[in-house]
């Protein structure tokens, strides 16, 4: 029996989530499986990969063949590197202590890198939010300034009108006085 480690789809349309399962290669994708070893959610950023690394390692060592996608996940989480180190121990190239230390060091570096990516994504998201807020504030202030200018123009148009009328009356009075003087002279 050929055993595969593969994904089994679940979740609704356009919101897929996957189970990482160990199954006979002849069984259908979402059908019968031997063991469920984890889950994979590609909807998050970065994608959420949760599986039991020890079970995956045991199945890999027993000869289970991962699909391409699952192979990438196992490599990402260090299961294939652990297999590589264990084969070195079996051949006698390195000791178990050295292999464990190398794997622990690699795992710490990888976890730091993953956490750094999550932090940078969160920071970038906050910065984008701040920029959108600043742009919105700028637009709001521009609208308020335009409204103030419009209001001031209306007030200026309404206030000088009576003064202009009073000036116009004075001008007419002066004009009539001038006309009277000219007529009298």
Image: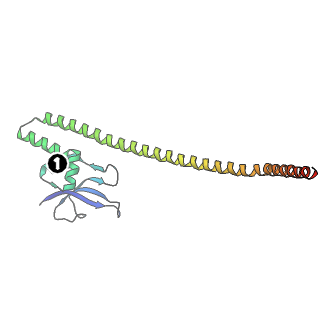
Query: Where on the picture, by quarter, is residue 118?
Result: top left
Q: Residue furthest front?
A: 185
Q: x, y percentage for residue 143?
A: 58, 50
Image coloring type = rainbow
How would you rate the neighbour count of disc 1 (Cα within 10 Å): few for under 14, some for 14-19, many for 20 or more?
few
Q: x, y percentage for residue 140?
A: 56, 48
132 left or right, relative to 24: right
The one of 58 and 163 positioned closer to us in this rendering: 163
157 left or right, relative to 182: left
Q: x, y percentage for residue 9?
A: 28, 61
The one of 164 and 62 positioned closer to us in this rendering: 164
Q: Secondary structure at mark 1?
A: helix
Q: Which residue is mark 1?
A: 58
Q: x, y percentage for residue 141?
A: 57, 46
Query: Where on the picture, by quarter, is residue 24?
Result: bottom left
The one of 160 and 66 positioned closer to us in this rendering: 160
Q: Is residue 159 visible?
A: no
Residue for point 41% across, 46% down = 125
């Amino acid at each position: 029996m050929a055993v595969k480690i593969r994904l089994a789809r679940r979740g609704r349309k356009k919101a897929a989530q996957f189970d990482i399962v160990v199954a006979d290669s002849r069984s259908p994708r979402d059908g019968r499986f031997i063991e469920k070893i984890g889950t994979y959610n590609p909807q998050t950023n970065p994608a959420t990969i949760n599986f039991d690394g020890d079970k995956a390692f045991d199945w890999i060592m027993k000869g289970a063949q991962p699909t391409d996608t699952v192979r990438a996940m196992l490599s990402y989480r260090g299961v294939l590197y652990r297999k590589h180190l264990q084969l070195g121990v079996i051949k006698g190239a390195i000791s178990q202590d050295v292999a464990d230390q190398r794997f622990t060091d690699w795992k710490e570096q990888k976890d730091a890198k993953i956490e750094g990516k999550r932090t940078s994504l969160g920071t970038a998201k906050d910065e984008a939010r701040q920029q959108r807020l600043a742009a919105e504030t700028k637009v709001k202030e521009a609208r308020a300034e335009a409204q103030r200018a419009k209001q001031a123009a209306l007030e200026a148009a309404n206030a000088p009108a009576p003064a202009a009328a009073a000036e116009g009356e004075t001008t007419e009075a002066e004009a009539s006085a001038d006309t009277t003087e000219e007529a009298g002279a």
